[in-house]
Amino acid sequence: MLLLAGCASTGGKGTPEASATASPTPITKASPVGEKTVEQVLGDIRYASKDIGDDRVSPVTLPGQEAAKVPPCQAHGVVLTREVPNHDELVLFTDRLQKRGWKLDGAIKVIDPIMLSSGKWDILLNAAPIPQGFAAKVDPNKGGISVAATGVCKKV
């Protein structure tokens, strides 16, 4: 959570900026089950985070990936929340992902990481309070759900 929360800037306004993953695709449109692009994975995360928190999840391009014409196959970030996420919010978040074709691996516990998979993609979620050193940068948010999505990198 420490690394992820540090990436979220408020722009000095005291409230989170718009999501870096925003796209013209409607939030209600489900992504396909099976082979997903990083944009479709991000759309699923945006859908799951609606009314829970501010999505700050974005694609990660590894060194040499663009030159090799390999699209992003990782996304990392945090969904900032006004309070530390509780069990009900995590259930809502994972239920929404499951409606988009993600399969939950195990039980939902606030203190344990949550793993979901869809095709060749995995998402790891973890709820936590904002670390003290970053609290001022994301005020008034007090918690978040860290998100790490990883897929299989394939040349296009």
Image (spheres, rainbow, N blue to C red):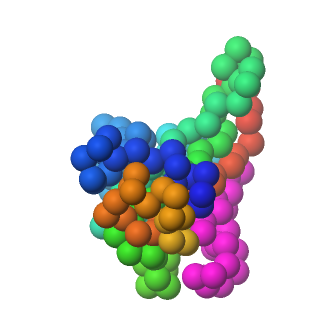
Tell me, yes or no, if residue 88 can be seen here.
Answer: yes
Residue at image location 35% in from the left, 38% down from the top: 23
- Whether residue 75 is in magenta: the answer is no
Residue at image location 64% in from the left, 72% down from the top: 114
Image quadrant in which the N terminus is located: bottom right
Give whichever of 131, 110 is nearer the camera.
Answer: 131
Looking at the image, residue 97 sits to the left or right of residue 70; the answer is left
Can you say whether 16 is above or below 112 in the image?
A: above
Can you say whether 72 is above or below 100 in the image?
A: above
Looking at the image, residue 32 sits to the left or right of residue 15; the answer is right
* Residue 101 screen position, x and y as percent: 55, 63
Tell me, yes or no, if residue 34 can be seen here.
Answer: no
* Residue 6 screen position, x and y as percent: 52, 49
User: Image quadrant of residue 143?
Assistant: bottom left
Residue at image location 41% in from the left, 69% down from the top: 142
* Residue 112 screen position, x and y as percent: 67, 79
Looking at the image, residue 100 sits to the left or right of residue 51; the answer is right
Give whichever of 133, 111 is nearer the camera.
Answer: 133
* Residue 45 screen position, x and y as percent: 47, 56
Residue at image location 71% in from the left, 30% down from the top: 62
Magenta segment range? Answer: 103-126
